[in-house]
Image (cartoon, rainbow, N blue to C red):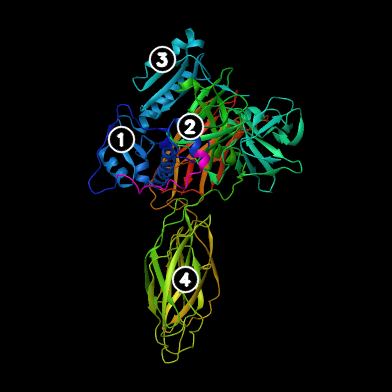
């Protein structure tokens, strides 16, 4: 089952051939600010330069622009994503394919470059489904099919050296699908290539020839593992070695027979690192170049410059040509939703690490028998997206601090938003960073006064009727610090005639109402020798609201989640009461008008796949944890994999199919699943994708519902 989180729009890559390039629209930016090229890792820049035949400086500029394109893609509004026929990186910016000028205007305003195409995502999906129906479980000579982001159509690859009567019959059926399906014939096709645990270094499964290490990872109990190719880990409980000749054992491959997949679901496996002396390293073996430290994971866009490390071809880079494309290696082995790249690869690279900058992006699956210039589709290298493997086995990628040397921009427009006799409240415009701002340090003169995570702070403990000067600096996760903001001066209030008496503690804090996203609170008034000026409402240790009355509503909460609240009173002199007694309130579940159901029956057939849509009219954001109830009648629950697609095209795993050898158990009735960490607006079309990965068992999806 394909379960990585991604934009569906990326699958439906936009057209370059036959696409209209729209002019820049008045009043909106054509692109984001120029990215910094000096933060690009030198090994990645050198590899891309060598692969593409460009200068290292040009490679740095393209890689920096690529990072900026991914940031723009992540920020596209949901209303636009649902209309996209595709997204890709053209070497300079993020390009999005649209079918209307209104969507083009939205894209341009968001910092993307719009392209007008004729086929929308629904039409491309219809064509791809038609191709899959023709290909079925395999056609001699047909080795690849998927959406071509360079042509706004569906491409089908045929190896002329293996074609026959069945091939031509299938090609004739494909032609009847219309001009949106294009046949590309080639004379060859891909094949599956058969100290520290370090990405790209070799390992040996038993007495077999070597494969390559993908990415080290840990499990929930701290156990050590590394990810690699499924076709390298197909034997259960096989010894894994770090040297040829069954020497220097690392651990055990495919423990229990359930940690390897080499089928429609993907090509991925796990090796348990059990032997003393083996450490997990986030440093990628770049074979003579400066090592790249893995800082996280990502999903590839078409046009991305990617590099991979493997034991035979060593450090190679290229451009992503297809994402979410299927391959048929023959003998009944079809693998879906793989990424195809122009980078060279050779036998022995299998399972090795693919990177997008310093982000893990894939595990090497297959490629050509020899490296060629200007490769045809049959000479491309193929990798398995890594996020799917991490999610399937609930593993955490081993990462390091990386090579981020770019500081955030300076906080802007520092200003005072309020003063008391003992405090000054400040606010500023947020900084930006190539990775992300993690904190702001507020300085009183040259002394650090406080550290916060958002663009506001209150400095307390000050003297009355005294002038103070403040500046702010931003920091990122790598410890890079921005220049200081503008300085701002503020004078605290006079001491209020010597008022040092704090208000009494607010009493009887209580909840007066709640929804799935808010809690309303009330409390008994405090008293003060001069007068209460305000009440500060805290959610845990975070200031959630400041009011002048004895009630407040805290919004922006997650459904079905417990929160703790306290209240403090303040007077005009800045004296604060002690905190009230804490009150714990659990928000409502996301139902009550936010549950939507599809009662349409869908047949579940061997190796079949379908999408069942449901329309949501709920407003606002979906809850962070979505509940899905699925009613199925099927004789083998282990054959079934399920994913949930948001209206904006992200996919979340709901249920994995079995792997390795397993016994079938029946599924008759409803099962409830929770999908965590969902980031999506609630309104729009949600889809349940159901895939049958096994033979000999059929059934039906009776109904499903989603609670947002």
Instruction: Estimate how packed mark 3 is, as few (under 14), some (14 to 19) or many (20 or more) residues with alpha carbons within 10 Å.
Output: some
SS at mark 2?
helix
Q: Which residue is mark 3?
A: 173
Q: Which residue is mark 2?
A: 50
Q: Which residue is mark 4?
A: 443
Mark 4 vs 3, N-terminal side:
3
Residue lying at the far top of the rendered structure: 165
Mark 1 vs 2, N-terminal side:
2
Write down the region rendered in magenta: 30-44
> Foreground: 244 or 599?
244
Mark 2 vs 4, N-terminal side:
2
Q: CA distance from mark 2 to mark 3?
A: 42 Å
Residue 163 visible? The answer is yes
Q: Which residue is mark 1?
A: 115
Mark 4 vs 1, N-terminal side:
1
> Which residue is found at the position 76% from the left and 35% from the top?
248
Of the residues tagged 1 and 2, which is closer to the observer?
2
Mark 3 vs 1, N-terminal side:
1
Q: Quadrant of the N terminus?
A: top right
């Amino acid at each position: 089952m394909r379960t990585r989180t991604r934009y569906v729009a990326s699958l439906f890559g936009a057209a370059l051939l036959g696409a209209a390039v729209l002019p820049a629209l008045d009043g909106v930016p054509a692109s984001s600010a120029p990215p910094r090229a000096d933060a690009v890792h030198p090994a990645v820049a050198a590899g891309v330069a060598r692969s593409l035949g460009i200068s290292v400086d040009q490679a740095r500029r393209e890689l920096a622009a690529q990072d900026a394109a991914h940031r723009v893609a992540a920020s596209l509004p949901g209303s636009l994503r649902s209309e996209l026929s595709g997204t890709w990186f053209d070497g300079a910016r993020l390009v999005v394919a649209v079918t209307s000028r209104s969507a083009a205007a939205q894209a341009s305003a968001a910092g993307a470059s719009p392209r007008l195409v004729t086929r929308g995502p629904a039409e491309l999906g219809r064509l791809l489904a038609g191709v899959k129906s023709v290909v079925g479980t395999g056609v001699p000579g047909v080795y690849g099919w998927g959406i071509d982001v360079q042509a706004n159509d569906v491409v089908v690859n045929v190896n002329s050296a293996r074609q026959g009567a069945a091939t031509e019959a299938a090609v004739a059926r494909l032609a009847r699908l219309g001009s949106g399906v294009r046949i590309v014939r080639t004379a060859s096709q891909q094949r599956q290539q058969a100290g520290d645990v370090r990405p790209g270094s070799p390992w040996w499964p038993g007495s077999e020839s070597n494969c390559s290490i993908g990415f080290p990872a840990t499990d929930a109990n701290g156990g050590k593992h590394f990810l690699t190719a499924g076709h390298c880990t197909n034997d259960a409980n096989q010894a894994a070695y770090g040297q040829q000749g069954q020497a220097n054992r690392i651990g055990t491959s495919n423990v229990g027979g359930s940690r390897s997949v080499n089928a429609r679901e993907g090509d991925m496996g796990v090796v348990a690192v059990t032997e003393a002396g083996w450490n997990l390293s986030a440093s990628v073996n770049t074979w003579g170049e400066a090592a790249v430290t893995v800082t996280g994971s990502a999903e590839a866009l078409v046009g991305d410059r990617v590099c991979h490390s493997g034991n035979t071809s060593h450090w190679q880079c290229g451009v992503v040509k297809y994402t979410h494309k299927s391959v048929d290696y023959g003998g009944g082995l079809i693998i879906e939703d793989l990424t195809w790249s122009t980078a060279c690869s050779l036998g022995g690279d299998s399972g090795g690490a693919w990177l997008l900058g310093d982000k893990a992006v894939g595990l090497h699956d297959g490629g050509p028998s020899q490296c060629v210039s200007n490769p045809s589709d049959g000479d491309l290298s193929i990798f398995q997206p890594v996020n799917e493997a991490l999610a399937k086995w609930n593993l955490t990628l081993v990462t390091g601090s990386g090579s981020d040397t770019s500081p955030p921009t300076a906080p802007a427009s520092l200003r005072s938003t309020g003063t008391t006799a003992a405090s000054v409240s400040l606010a500023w415009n947020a900084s930006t960073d190539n990775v992300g701002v993690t904190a702001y340090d507020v300085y009183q003169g040259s002394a650090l006064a406080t550290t916060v995570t958002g663009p506001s702070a209150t400095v307390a403990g000050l003297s009355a009727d005294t002038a103070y000067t403040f500046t702010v600096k931003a920091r990122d996760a790598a410890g890079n610090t921005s220049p200081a903001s503008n300085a701002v001066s503020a004078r605290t209030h006079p001491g209020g005639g010597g008022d040092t008496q704090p208000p009494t503690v607010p009493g009887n804090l209580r909840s007066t109402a709640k929804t799935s996203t808010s809690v309303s609170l009330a409390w008994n008034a405090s008293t003060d020798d001069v007068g209460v000026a305000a009440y500060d409402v805290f959610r845990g240790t975070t200031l959630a609201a400041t009011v002048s009355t004895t009630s407040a509503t805290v919004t922006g909460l997650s459904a079905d989640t417990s929160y703790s609240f306290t209240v403090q009173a303040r007077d005009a002199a800045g004296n604060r009461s002690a905190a009230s007694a804490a009150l714990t309130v659990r928000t409502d579940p996301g139902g009550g008008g936010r549950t939507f159901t599809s009662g349409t029956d869908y047949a579940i057939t061997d190796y079949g796949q379908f999408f069942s849509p449901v329309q949501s009219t709920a407003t606002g954001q979906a809850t962070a944890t979505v509940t899905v109830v699925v009613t199925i009648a099927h004789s083998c629950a282990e054959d079934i994999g399920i994913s949930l697609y948001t209206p904006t095209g992200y996919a979340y795993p709901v249920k994995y199919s079995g792997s390795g050898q397993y016994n079938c158990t029946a599924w008759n009735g409803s099962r409830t699943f929770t999908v965590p960490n969902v980031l999506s607006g609630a309104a729009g079309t949600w889809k349940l994708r159901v895939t049958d990965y096994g033979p000999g068992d059929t059934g039906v999806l009776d109904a499903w519902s989603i609670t947002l």
